[in-house]
Amino acid sequence: MQFFSNILPTIKRYWLPIILSSLTAVTLAACNPSNFKSSAAQVPQLVSSILSDPKTFNYALSQESPNIFGLTYEGLINQNPITGKVEPALAESWQISEDKLKFTFTLRKNLKWSDGQPLTADDVVFTYNDIYFNEAVPTDVKDAFRIGTSRKLPTVRKIDERRVEFTLPEPFRPFLLNTSTYILPAHALQKSVEQKDTEGKPTFLAKWGVDTPAEEIIVNGTYKLERYDTSQRVVFQRNPYYWRKDSQGQSQPYIERLVWQIVENTDTSLLQFRSGGLDTVGITPDYFSLLKVQEKQGNFKIYGDEPTTSTSFVLFNLNKGKRNGKSLVEPIKSRWFNTIEFRQAVAYAIDRQTMINNTFRGLGKPQDSPITVQSPYYLSPEEGLKTYNYNPEKAKQLLIKAGFKYNQQGQLLDAEGNRVRFTLLTNSGNKIREAMGAQIKQDLSKIGMQVDFTPIAWSTYTDKLSNTLDWEASLLGLTGGLEPNDGANVWSPEGGLHMFNQKPQPGQKPIEGWEVSPWEAEIGKLYIQATQEFDEAKVKQIYGKTQQITQENLPFIYLVNPLSMTAVRDRFEGIKYSPIAGAFWNIHEIKITK
């Protein structure tokens, strides 16, 4: 499963480090971190920042970052971002049948929830059967577990208090990694799943919103929610019932409290870090030169210089459907957007190298694939991946071939004489993304297109993308990871993040005339095929074909892959930086030394 990213990038299994170092800011008066720090000066804590308020405390219903869940929950297993190996988490061990259809997990002894209640096999069965696999619950988790062309889900049963058995309808290569999905508390949520509201929907859909008192959020992760002050901060305290202990038997995590300041401007986050108000900050390209020379004086270290595992892209709304008889996209513009030459022309017209040189200060690389370069399934240009190097003349040729034309002023018109003009949305408050959008507007003007670039509030933006579907073009990012099937909800035509041609999700208004193009269907089928194949060379070949199709048809026009870098105060010991997971993926091991 992937998430919308309102900061350059986060990832599903390892979103925590980026959140802790996110590119944000805070007003200097009431929200200054030192004001909160003084009230708890004796408590060892880590103060960082996030770009916007959390949208929900209900993991099953979450689609965006920032979110709290990497701190508050764990699954049966984890994947180590340094070694790539699968490691035990809530489950101490597992067995896989020879036919790869049965997975039996044994939970650790004496696991507990944050309220002291026992965590047992009942919680695992409840989490999967009653929430994730419940068709009445619109969760993206479901997409990652749908198996084969039948799209069937595994069955889950309790063997005893500590053992759970998953039975698959057919072999499914990514299944073990998928069990890193978080386990939720049956004793706190069961009733809300069973109860129905006046519309016949589970009351679970309204459970654990951001207005829920912190003490009611029951968790099993390293930290539990201590308080949430809207538009100011999220505060976590260590979970006293967390299962991990170090080699000396001392309970982990070591850091008592984490504080996320909620901020809105990336410049102010830098100011807060330099003044000592924040313990860590994500390094945007425009910060790097300034901070690099201050490492020793400022008592911090900059970690990382490899590409992130995220994506950034422009996409057009390809949805041809209608709601209440009204087209989601104006028919004239829909014809433009659904013309492959139009999308390819846009790709050739965006000067990504200039974007890297200027906006990213050289600290990035061109991006050409939905699959991260760190993945063993990445297809390089040398292996046949199509790329779109800057070529405005080729862009114009493609447009003319598709029936577009130019007037005497150099403005682009369609075959009926309509001026090509559309609105490009992105989230406000992110300087990097706003700079990218400004350049895209300028670049596309050189091939005669008029782009109305409009940054808007994150909550409004995501509502348009995933609910009202009222948008034309967007500049966005998604999370990334090593396993492409984590993005099944993006590439399945019915997936919850198939945003370029979104089918309404459960509970949303129906769409008349929604249709799937042949290339969309083909990508969906290939993603299914890749989960059924256990020969790694063949898996790479299958995912290679998906990348070729995406680059030919351009549902996403990929832009720049920035370098992953984070500054962290020297007083934190145990940092094991990963470009996949950042500086704090091992938060349970990190200590404060000063």
Image (cartoon, rainbow, N blue to C red):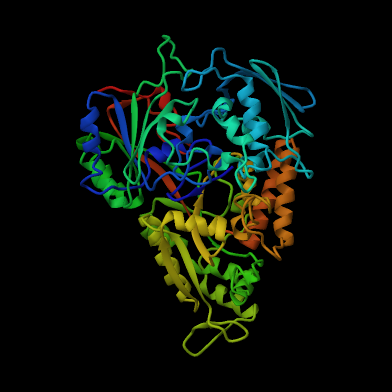
Give the x, y percent position of residue 334: 62, 72
Image location (x, y in percent) of residue 366: 49, 55
When the figure is inspected, residue 423 is found, relative to residue 536, above or below; the finding is: below
Q: Is residue 513 above or below residue 46?
A: below
- What is the quadrant of the N terminus in the image? top right
* Outermost residue, top side: 248
Is 426 on the left-hand or right-hand side of 546? left
Confirm whether residue 386 shows in the render.
yes
Q: Please identify the quarter of the rendering in which residue 123 is found.
A: top right
- Residue drawn at the location 65% of the way across and 29% of the way down: 176
Q: How many marks?
A: 0
Q: Which residue occupies the extreme bottom position in the image?
A: 408
Q: Is residue 383 visible?
A: no
Judging depth in this view, the residue of 484 and 501 nearest the camera is 501
Quarter-of-image position of residue 75: top right
Residue 14: percent from the left, percent from the top? 49, 36
- From this viewpoint, which residue is outermost toward the front? 198
On screen, residue 477 versus residue 298, left or right, reads right
For the C terminus, the quadrant is top left
